[in-house]
Amino acid sequence: MATKVKSEAPSSELRAALDELETGIEAVRLAYEKYFGGIERVPPSKQRAKLEKAMRNVETRGVTNTVIRFRLNGLRARLITYKHYWTRMENQLERGMSRRDLLRRRRVQAAAPPPQPEAPPAEAAEAIGRDGPPPPPGKRKGRVRPPDPAKSGIDPSHLRSVFKQLVLAKRAAGESTQGLTYQALVRKLTAEAPKLKRKHGCEKLQFSVSTRGGKVRLRSEPEG
């Protein structure tokens, strides 16, 4: 069925209707910007529907005046462009991909504290320093204990402190501590003790932890 076209209204009435349309388009545009920006919680759907109805009413008035028809076509094209934009933005909101969502994520990431190097709890480090990590179930019997560092001229309490410092330094530098246990450190240093004592010309040794060039090193020196 063909749409009935009303007889053309007076030019002054049509110009007033176009003024209202232009004002209405701008008002709906601002309302959508507030919604997309998170200021308003619901979209201006009713306001938009009222605007589209007003546009249809003007279009059915049979405009023949060239100037008025040109302005009407411009307002119609502007509204169509905005409608496509509003629809696209609403779809992005539904998918969580809108500019508002992206800005919110950036604010959350900026406010989050930077990750810190993980350090072993004091209790865990103390436990490892005393006895090393517990053996797996079923292997407690017959466990081989590390040699006594005191017999090699190394103070056991000093060595436990050095082990804790070594673990913390490696974690801070991003180095792996896999396989690093107090028992392994005792075996390594007691095995190297004779050579180190000859090197330093001493009977007792002490150690220090240092980081150079991003690498953690364990240095030996005479006790004193």
Image (spheres, rainbow, N blue to C red):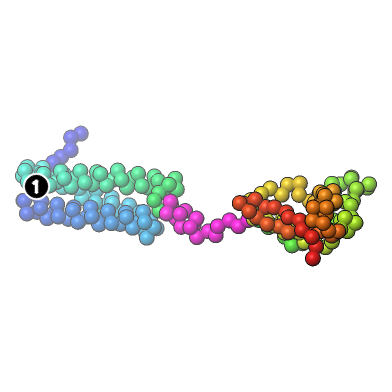
Looking at the picture, tell me which residue is in the foreground, 58 or 179: 179
- Residues in magenta? 101-117
Depth order, front residue of 14/222: 222
Relative to 37, is 125 on the left or the right?
A: right
The reply to whether residue 89 is visible in this rendering is yes
Q: x, y (%) of residue 94?
A: 43, 47
State whether residue 78 is above or below residue 166: above
Q: The N terminus lies in which quarter of the figure?
A: top left
Total labels drawn = 1
Q: Amino acid at mark 1?
A: Ile
The secondary structure that dominates the magenta segment is helix
In percent of width and height, residue 137 lies at 86, 46
Pick whichever, 216 or 122, lies toward us.
Answer: 216
Residue at (45% x, 48% y) in the render: 96
80 inside magenta stretch = no
What's the residue at 18%, 52% (across, down)? 21
Percent of width and height locating residue 183: 83, 51
Task: Name the quadrant containing residue 62.
Answer: top left
User: Considering the numbered disc 1 on the image, is that residue within a helix, a strand or a loop?
Assistant: helix
Q: Which residue is mark 1?
A: 68
